[in-house]
């Protein structure tokens, strides 16, 4: 009799305690508040910036840093987050500004905490102003941070999403991170091939490995790159059948985009939309979709204990949250 595996291809998903999610959400919000001030300052260098504006923002930066310590968040922030908050105003480097990619992770954590009721499609971003309002945290006021976290400190706090909702959200995240990674692999194959056409094959693989690491792509996925033109249509069909994407367009994940509006449509507040295949987006939009998928995937992976530290590099080591990516899990599992 042939051996048959009986273990389920899915494991029950167990979230970290709600107060841990609240602490991580608070750390994100504090650093993103600083990110907003630094980004505004960077843009202000090319515009009209008064001395009073600069002084006001400097005081806000100092207040945010003080709030981290007075609220006790310094015990829960990563070393990178503390370093960013402790830097003098207007001294951030490029790697610090990249922290802005965490907005989508903040939204996912707030959804898990019940403060955000809907996860937008993976081609749309969370409303950033609403994310800040959801918590009632005033970044410069430590007491508001404590009030928010205290809401989730009781051991009797129940999870705000049920098991079915959580499973669907994780499955959807896996579908979109797979598609984002597939697009990177498609681009890298051509890029590496052109760059190393006259080099030995072993050097080509070494260059590819390095490129994958910088884009947080598990190196094991390179094995699927050659067959992606055939695999993507199959992934799109499976994802649609499982309700993980809204539509399939030309054998690819369908992306809803807004079309250029006429003056009449602008006045009527009725934007026109159309659906295009994922692969047809330009490089800027592809990069934006990858960052949305990556940030939300990291939030779910951390919240479910699949990565132990809040570090985007860790997601580059993780193929999926389920034992098998939800796209490829049999329907009866």
Image (spheres, helix red, strand yellow):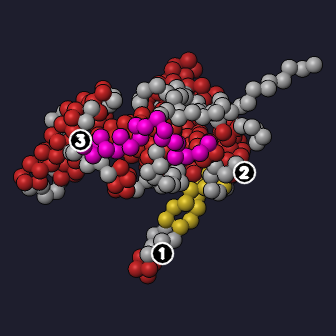
Residue 218 versus residue 199: which sits nearer the camera? 218
Q: How many marks?
A: 3
- Magenta highlight on residue 119: no
> Would you call the spot at circle 3 few (<14 residues within 10 Å), some (14-19), or many (20 or more)?
many
Q: Residue furthest bottom?
A: 264
> Would you call the spot at circle 2 few (<14 residues within 10 Å), some (14-19), or many (20 or more)?
some
**Can residue 329 be seen here?**
yes
Q: Residue furthest left?
A: 51
* Residue at 49% from the left image edge and 27% from the top image edge: 307
Left or right: 156 with respect to 321? left
Compared to 318, does 175 lie above or below? below
Circle 3 SS class:
helix
Where does the magenta region start and end? Answer: 143-163
Give how far apart the Cα atoms at labels 3 and 1 are: 42 Å
* Residue at 62% from the left image edge and 56% from the top image edge: 246
Residue 88 versus residue 71: which sits nearer the camera? 71
Residue 266 versus residue 168: which sits nearer the camera? 168
Tag 1 residue: 270
Q: Which mark is residue 241?
A: 2
* Residue at 62% from the left image edge and 52% from the top image edge: 245
Q: Earlier in the sequence, mark 3 or mark 1?
A: 3
**Position in image of residue 113 (x %, y %):** 46, 45
Residue 184 versus residue 328: which sits nearer the camera? 328
Q: Which mark is residue 142?
A: 3
* Quarter the N terminus occupies: top right
């Amino acid at each position: 009799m042939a051996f048959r595996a009986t273990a389920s291809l899915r494991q029950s998903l167990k979230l970290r305690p709600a107060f841990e999610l609240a602490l991580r959400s608070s750390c994100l919000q504090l650093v993103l508040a600083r990110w907003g001030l630094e980004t505004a300052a960077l843009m202000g260098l090319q515009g009209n910036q008064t001395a009073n504006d600069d002084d006001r923002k400097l005081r806000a930066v100092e207040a945010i840093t003080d709030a981290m310590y007075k609220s006790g968040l310094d015990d829960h922030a990563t070393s990178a987050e503390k370093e960013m908050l402790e830097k003098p105003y207007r001294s951030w480097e490029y790697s610090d500004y990249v922290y802005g990619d965490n907005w989508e992770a903040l939204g996912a954590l707030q959804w898990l905490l019940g403060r955000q009721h809907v996860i937008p499609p993976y081609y749309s971003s969370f409303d950033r102003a609403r994310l800040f309002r959801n918590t009632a945290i005033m970044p410069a006021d430590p007491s508001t941070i404590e009030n928010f976290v205290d809401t989730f400190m009781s051991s009797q706090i129940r999870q705000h999403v049920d098991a079915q909702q959580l499973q669907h959200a994780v499955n959807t995240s896996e579908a979109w991170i797979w598609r984002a990674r597939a697009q990177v692999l498609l681009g890298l194959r051509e890029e590496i091939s052109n760059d190393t056409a006259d080099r030995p094959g072993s050097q080509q693989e070494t260059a590819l490995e390095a490129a994958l690491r910088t884009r947080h792509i598990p190196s094991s996925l390179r094995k699927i790159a050659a067959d992606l033109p055939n695999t993507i249509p199959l992934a799109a069909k499976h994802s649609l059948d499982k309700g993980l994407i809204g539509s399939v367009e030309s054998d690819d994940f369908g992306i809803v985009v807004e079309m250029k509006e006429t003056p009449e449509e602008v006045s009527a507040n009725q934007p026109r939309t159309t659906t295009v295949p994922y692969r047809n987006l330009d490089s800027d939009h592809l990069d934006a979709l990858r960052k949305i998928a990556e940030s939300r995937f990291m939030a779910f992976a951390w919240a479910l204990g699949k990565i132990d530290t809040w570090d985007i590099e860790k997601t580059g080591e993780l193929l999926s949250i389920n034992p098998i990516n939800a796209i490829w899990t049999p329907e009866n599992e």
